[in-house]
Image (tube, rainbow, N blue to C red):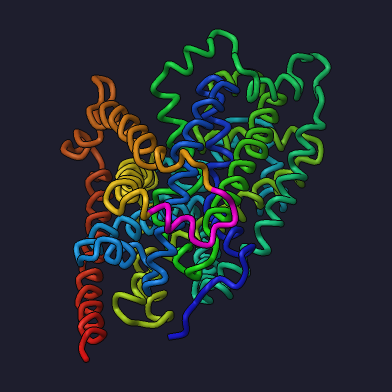
Amino acid sequence: MAKDSWTTRVGVILAVTGSAVGLGNFLRFPGEAVKHGGGVFLIPYLVAFLIVGIPLAWVEWSLGRYGGTRGHHSAPGIFRSLFRHRSGSYVGILGTLMPVMIYTYYVFVEAWCLAYAWDFLTGRMASLGGSGEEVQAHFFGLVGATDHGSVFAAGGGRILPFVAICFVLNFALIYRGVAKGIEVFCNIAMPLLVVCAGVVLVRVLTLGTPDPDLPEQSVINGLGYMWNPVQPGTTIWATLGSPDAWLAATGQVFFSLSVGFGLILTYASYLKEKDDVALSSLTACAGDGFSAVVLGGMIAIPAAFVFLGPAVVEDPPGTFGMGFIALPQVFNLMPLGQFFGFLFFFLLFLAAVTSSLSMLQPSIAFLEEALGIGRKPSVAILGFITLAGSMFVIWFSRGFGALDTIDWWMANFFIFIMATLQIIYFGWILGVGEGMKELARGAEIRLPAFLPFVLKYVSPTFLLLVFGYWAYREIGGTEDKPGRFAQLLSLPEEGPPVVQLSVGLIALVAAFFAFVAAAGNRRWDRAAIKETTP
């Protein structure tokens, strides 16, 4: 089996940046910022970015390269080499389970972006006008949000061809490998993504005041909702004193940088022993932060404010509501909106593909090295798993029940566990001194003198405090909204038990990966014995 690796530093930086740049940058970040005080939200975001995001990215890049030089490209293999014990491979299963389960619904959302780009290009979306009710009905009908299985019913499957296109594209690229598939695509897609974002941004910033009868709805005032430190009716201290703002900021950093998922571990494992990880990681973090704060923060909210008024930013819809209901109305009201709507959703599609590719590679690498099989069978196995999972998510699409449940467990619960585990291992088990030696190997920048203190004390303490508050709020629940474990133990009064079925699907995939890890351990043990036998 030929050894795969990155061919250029730019290639790996663009790939890692692409894995992070996605819907969270262009839709989730602006919504979270406006919801938590506008410009002042940047303070907890930047704090989390500096004491959790960048340190954790450095940890994952260095641990990934460490595992790669020892012949492992998957989180289970890397953790086995770190723990120097077969139990590490079972801990590392999280680094394959999370990306695969997230892919099962992410590719569905990816298909929404492609469908919307097509609808704008062909004029279908323009025919809906600026009516929120018509755009919402279009969205719900497209994704089957009103009833389980509706997209598979007669006349309701318009989204399925777009899902098929996304699946084929993702697996065609992942089959080609790291260098010929992921790197080549990201080298093209990332610059194109920046160009598309730049064109849409220029258009938004030149909107001025489209309605002279509503002079307050100007692009300047729209930018104010995103960037002013204080919004009407609140204070800086009210936001900074809110645990929810810090929780939202930390969660956004995870999404923005793709840390804690196991993706970077795999990507960095294809580096050589002396390849720089310190500067490369910092460059990828900077590129992703730019796309979220500058591009994402200056497109969605100002445009929505100008055409839909202050209500849309004072009480912002969720990520899906902003991206697939509010913004299409904006483009339908904007001069040349058909073109800019196509460009924006094509931009989201490109961002989604660069992210979804990174979700597949960890499991491909795991299947290859644990089972000793080639690219073709590993792609076929993973294709079957993800296709079955995606069909499950698409079938149980009413109210996004399956999507929401899988997202909560993967991108909220397990990600905190994985991130905290890596930070604690790096600072306390491996030892921050040894960890810094690994990070500094081949580094082309001088690492801050205070970094060991941050990695050992500040980052894990911050993560544990945020996770503790999140667990108190989410798991315990309230009288109005039961916690997630309470939801898991209670059956719905009517309809299928979507929460229980979704958790069952997660458990089934986890069990399969545990079986693969067991097979891998036997294979790796035999290889270790062979190496030590004279």
Q: Is residue 309 left or right of residue 181?
A: right
Q: Quadrant of the C terminus?
A: bottom left
Say if 107 sits above or below 472 in the image. Answer: below
**Does the rendering let one see residue 373?**
yes
**Nearer-the-camera pick, 477 or 273:** 273
Q: Position of residue 425 (x, y in %)?
A: 30, 50
Q: Quadrant of the N terminus?
A: bottom left
At horizontal 19% and vertical 62% (from top left) the residue drawn is 87
Q: Is residue 96 left or right of residue 193?
A: left
Q: What are the residue bounds of the magenta stretch?
A: 435-446
At horizontal 27% and vertical 51% (from top left) the residue drawn is 429
Q: Position of residue 376 (x, y in %)?
A: 42, 81
* Furthest residue toward bottom: 534
Residue 258 is one of the magenta-drawn residues: no
Q: Position of residue 381 (x, y in %)?
A: 35, 73
Residue 443 is one of the magenta-drawn residues: yes
At horizontal 18% and vertical 38% (from top left) the residue drawn is 491
Q: Position of residue 274 (x, y in %)?
A: 51, 67
How many numbered marks appear?
0
Say if 29 sits above or below 389 in the image. Answer: above
Say if 148 sits above or below 298 in the image. Answer: below
**Does the rendering let one see residue 113?**
no
* Furthest residue toward top: 233
Q: Is residue 219 left or right of residue 50?
A: right
At horizontal 57% and vertical 56% (from top left) the residue drawn is 280
* Furthest residue toward left: 489
**Nearer-the-camera pick, 372 or 32:** 372
